[in-house]
Image (cartoon, rainbow, N blue to C red):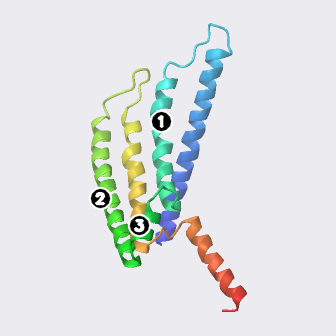
Amino acid sequence: MLKKIYNVLDRIRMVAIVSVTAFLILLCLVQIIFRYFTFIGIRPFAWGDEVMRLAVIWPAFLAASLGAKEGTHISVTHFIKKYLPEKGTKLVLKIANVLVILVLGYLVYFGTERTVANIPTSLQNLDMSMAWFYAAIPVGCLYLFIDYTLIFIFGRHPFSINYINRDDDLQKQAMLSGN
């Protein structure tokens, strides 16, 4: 059940990352063509630069949660493992995870407050609420919160490609060794 729910959320995240990134690339391309490769009468969209600058936060926050899922974020576990015993390492990593989860909970709560507060505020060149762009913070942090909570509970992300491949590799090694 947990895997099915997570897979739906993961699919939504991936579609959002690809869709927003594709939109940003297309809008940027159109802006460049209008600005540099057309006659003087065609101007780029007045709202294009503003939307591109603000919309780039969506793929950044959503991809950060994908990085947490796959364990690709920079960490200092090498130094912790080098200077602490195994029990100390596990304790420090658990404490760090709890702190990250608490900060993400804080960001989800106050990011939601800021998003709601910016509903009446609109962009300068387009009749669109700023809340759409502020919403990337609580949504991205909620994804991060979910991923780090799963990491805290299971020790590593249970739905990570690396986690699944590692288990498959261990099974293959066991079969090859005859165990």
Q: Quadrant of residue 136?
A: top left
Does residue 50 lie above or below 11 as drawn? Answer: above
Q: Residue at x 55, y 52 (%)?
A: 14
Q: Which mark is residue 55?
A: 1
Provide the secondary structure element on which disc 1 rests: helix
Q: Residue furthest bottom?
A: 179
52 and 4: which one is in front?
Answer: 52
Q: Earlier in the sequence, mark 2 or mark 1?
A: 1
Does residue 116 lie above or below 81 as drawn? Answer: above
Say whether residue 97 is left or right of residue 158. Answer: left
User: Crowding near pointer 2: few (<14 within 10 Å), some, many (20+)?
Assistant: few
Provide the secondary structure element on which disc 2 rests: helix
Q: Amino acid at mark 2?
A: Leu
Q: How many marks?
A: 3
Q: Quadrant of residue 57?
A: top left
Q: Residue at x 62, y 71 (%)?
A: 165
Q: Earlier in the sequence, mark 2 or mark 3?
A: 3
User: Crowding near pointer 1: few (<14 within 10 Å), some, many (20+)?
Assistant: some
Q: Position of residue 128 (x, y in %)?
A: 41, 29
Q: Earlier in the sequence, mark 1 or mark 3?
A: 1
Q: Which mark is residue 80?
A: 3
Q: Position of residue 155 (x, y in %)?
A: 44, 72
* Front: mark 1 or 3: 3
Q: According to the image, label 2 marks what residue?
A: 102
Q: Residue furthest top?
A: 40
- Label 2 vs label 1: CA separation? 26 Å
Q: Position of residue 12 (x, y in %)?
A: 52, 53
Q: Residue furthest right?
A: 176
